[in-house]
Image (spheres, rainbow, N blue to C red):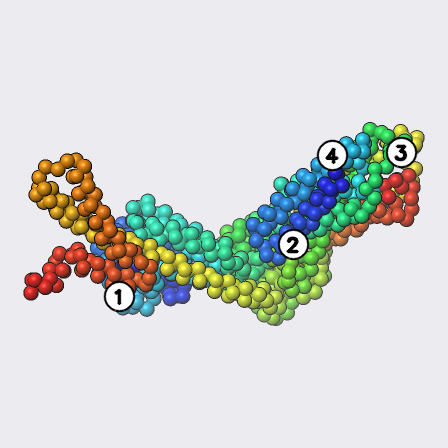
């Protein structure tokens, strides 16, 4: 099979802003995409992946462009013209589609490079597709390959181990202090976007509760609702320190809002259990001297940036190794596809020659008249071994390793030489001129 | 024969320390598995050596300096491995294995002569008191290693300079928990060691307590750990302070083991 029949059509956080992705999110009926895509002509195998950052259809089609058009229409459901949608979608074909698939699975294409959630989402997507009987030989193999490539990248490189955004750095540090984040409470002070993102990441690590404090109480209540948490008045901030473990602050206050002397007595109340303070506000919200207190860990935006930088350089090194693995696996997969591509030719070739052998044998046997069983056997063996010996080189020639283009030329040559495609060889047949 | 066995054991311990060091640097799981396997083999060889020594001496081999320190290393090995079975503390082995090796080297340089048992020691209390006391030391040593790891990790987190340890050591919480677990085993053993010692003293010398330097120092050690545990449970002393106390407490325990014998003598002088 030709690798060029594999396509990936999709939008992700890089190609489409969130408003566009929101319009694509398929949250309602989970069976809908399968029913809709299944009936598209030429869509032989497909898998449908939908996460908050991407929507992708991985499909195998022999009608390329036509199928792609129909799938794109389905994705945008008439909300956007084909041309306009073109601004946001990407379409990968052949080897590019394979590498894209592997990169997605390993989290190399994610917003936070190397994040592990995507692999689980991809596995779910594949499970759904198989349950709906939408996959076949090629996609089954490709998806399993994508999982094993992701695993290989995870074990052979350190890509997943380092935090690469401020909020991930905060989570990583929190884990270094508390180990497990379950049963921990987070206090979010102020309403900065970055602080909210950090709180979200912490919440996704399974923290017990998110408490929000804001100058405008109504706003605190609103934010708390998005975390399923509770809101407290700004004046209760210090008192809250007795029960929370992580504080993320990003108010627009002109001066410090929390001093060392305020926190010190709270540590006794906390029975000295560790307190992680994250100050993402500019200008700063938290007294830098807080870091001098025992069991208090204060990190400002620059400190977090440092963690990010350390991780980034490490990650860049690892990314190079990860990309090498992707290239290697893409090549391996293409070779496998190539091998299913030459198989029909080998089968055709064998069938043709064996048919000739049988016909010639029958003729010869008829001419030779009465033969003993031994003689008959000897003639058959002769014919068989001739056929096998004649076929050996053409088959070896087909199976040779090398670029895909060469492989196609070789297949073509063999098919022509042995006249395996009757209509094509006939007009090249010198006698038929 | 047992001499050769001891040397082989020592060599295997050194090998495991080297393997743990390589693991610490490379962080490759296969190497950790190898290091652990080597440590387990060393522990097994060591057990065989102790048994051989028991047969050779005809009494519990806990009376000479060589025997005590070697038993200390043995307890530390199995104490560590038993912890390993319940808790997984990353890179703990890298800190424990060198300590074991150092103890074994000290044992190697002490006289391996088998001394006849003085009359006072001919008692059923010998194996019990001595082994319990040394095992207590082993768990306190584990708490010491945990404390050291805590301080290293805490330092990098506080200074925000992330070096060799930050990514390799476990979370502060895990190290603090380790500290507590080791003390929870070590302290009762220490208490039991002191109690059995005093009962034995009553039988051997007619008095439960005679303020022998070793007795005094073991009491000081006991008070240090008791204070630490008390503070832990009442005001929540944890983290850095607990780690420092675990280190100070272990120094006191070591002083009880060696310092007292070197500098002060007393009724326990035979183990020196």
Residue A410: which quarter of the image?
bottom left
Tell me the chain of label 1.
A
- Is A54 in front, or is B116? B116
Answer above or below: position of B100 versus A42: above
Badge 3 density bin: few <14, some 14–19, many ≥20, Cα 10 Å: few
Is tag 4's residue or tag 2's residue first in the polypeptide sequence?
2
SS for callout 2: helix
Residue A336: which quarter of the image?
bottom left
Q: CA distance from mark 3 to mark 2?
A: 42 Å
Q: CA distance from mark 4 to mark 1?
A: 84 Å
Residue shown at 18%/37% (left/top)? A374
Same-subunit check for callouts 4 and 1: no
Which residue is label 4 attached to?
B51
Q: CA distance from mark 4 to mark 2?
A: 30 Å
Tell me the chain of label 4.
B
Residue shown at 44%/59% (left/top)? A325
Residue shown at 44%/55% (left/top)? A150
Same-subunit check for callouts 3 and 4: yes
Q: How many marks?
A: 4
Which residue is label 1 attached to?
A82
Q: Would residue A31 appear left or right of B127 to someone viewing this image?
A: left
Badge 4 density bin: few <14, some 14–19, many ≥20, Cα 10 Å: some
Which residue is label 3 attached to?
B118
């Amino acid at each position: 099979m030709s690798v060029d029949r594999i396509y990936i059509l999709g939008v992700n956080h890089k190609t489409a802003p969130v408003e566009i992705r929101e319009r694509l999110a398929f949250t309602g009926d989970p069976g809908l995409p399968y029913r809709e895509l299944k009936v598209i002509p030429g869509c032989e195998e497909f898998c449908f992946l939908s996460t908050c950052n991407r929507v992708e259809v991985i499909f195998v089609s022999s009608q390329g462009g036509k199928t792609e058009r129909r799938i794109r229409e389905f994705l945008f459901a008439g909300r956007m013209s084909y041309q306009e949608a073109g601004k946001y979608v990407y379409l990968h074909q052949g080897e590019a589609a394979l590498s894209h698939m592997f990169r997605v699975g390993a989290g190399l294409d994610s917003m936070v490079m190397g994040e592990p959630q995507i692999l689980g989402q991809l596995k779910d997507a594949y499970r759904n597709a198989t349950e709906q009987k939408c996959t076949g030989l090629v996609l089954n193999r490709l998806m399993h390959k994508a999982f094993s490539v992701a695993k290989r990248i995870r074990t052979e490189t350190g890509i997943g181990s380092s935090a690469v955004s401020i909020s991930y750095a905060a989570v990583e540090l929190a884990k270094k202090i508390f180990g497990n984040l379950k049963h921990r409470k987070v206090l979010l002070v102020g309403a900065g976007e970055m602080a909210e993102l950090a709180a979200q990441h912490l919440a996704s690590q399974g923290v017990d509760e998110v408490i929000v404090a804001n100058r405008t109480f109504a706003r605190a209540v609103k934010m708390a609702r998005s975390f399923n948490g509770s809101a407290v008045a700004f004046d209760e901030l210090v008192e809250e320190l007795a029960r929370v473990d992580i504080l993320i602050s990003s108010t627009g206050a002109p001066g410090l809002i929390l001093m060392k002397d305020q926190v010190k007595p709270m540590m006794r109340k906390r029975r000295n259990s560790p307190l992680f303070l994250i100050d993402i506000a500019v200008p700063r919200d938290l007294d830098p001297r807080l870091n001098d207190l025992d069991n208090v860990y204060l990190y400002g935006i620059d400190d977090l940036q440092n963690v990010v930088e350390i991780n980034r350089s490490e990650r860049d090194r690892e990314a190079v190794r990860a990309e090498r693995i992707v290239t290697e696996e893409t090549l391996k997969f293409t070779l496998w596809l190539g091998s299913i591509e030459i198989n029909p030719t080998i089968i055709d070739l064998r069938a043709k020659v064996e048919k000739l052998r049988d016909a010639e044998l029958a003729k010869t046997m008829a001419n030779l008249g009465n033969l003993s069983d031994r003689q008959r056997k000897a003639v058959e063996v002769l014919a068989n071994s001739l056929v096998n010996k004649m076929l050996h080189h053409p088959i070896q020639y087909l199976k040779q390793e090398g670029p895909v283009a060469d492989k196609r030329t070789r297949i073509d040559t063999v098919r022509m030489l042995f006249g395996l495609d009757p209509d094509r060889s006939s007009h090249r047949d010198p006698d038929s001129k | 024969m047992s001499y050769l066995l001891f040397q082989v054991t020592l060599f295997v311990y050194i090998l495991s320390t080297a393997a743990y060091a390589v693991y610490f640097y490379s962080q490759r799981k296969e190497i950790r598995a190898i290091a652990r396997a080597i440590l387990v083999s060393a522990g097994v060889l060591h057990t065989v050596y102790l048994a051989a020594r028991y047969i050779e001496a005809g009494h519990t081999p806990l009376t000479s300096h060589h025997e005590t320190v070697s038993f200390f290393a043995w307890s530390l090995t199995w104490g560590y491995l038993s912890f390993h079975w319940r808790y997984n503390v990353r890179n703990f082995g890298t800190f424990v294995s060198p300590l074991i090796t150092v103890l074994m080297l000290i044992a190697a340089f002490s006289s391996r002569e088998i001394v006849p048992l003085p009359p006072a020691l001919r008692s059923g209390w010998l194996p019990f008191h001595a082994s319990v006391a040394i095992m207590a030391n082993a768990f306190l040593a584990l708490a010491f290693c945990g404390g050291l790891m805590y301080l290293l990790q805490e330092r990098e987190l506080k200074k925000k300079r992330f070096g060799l340890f930050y990514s390799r050591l476990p979370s502060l919480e895990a190290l603090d928990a380790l500290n507590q677990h080791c003390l929870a085993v070590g302290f009762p053993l220490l208490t039991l060691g002191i109690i059995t010692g005093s009962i034995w003293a009553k039988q051997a010398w007619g008095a439960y307590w005679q303020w022998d330097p070793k007795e005094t120092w073991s009491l000081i050690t006991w008070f240090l750990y008791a204070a630490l545990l008390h503070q832990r449970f009442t005001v929540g002393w944890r983290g850095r302070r607990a780690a420092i106390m675990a280190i100070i407490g272990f120094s006191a325990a070591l002083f009880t083991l060696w310092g007292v014998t070197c500098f002060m003598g007393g009724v326990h002088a035979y183990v020196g």
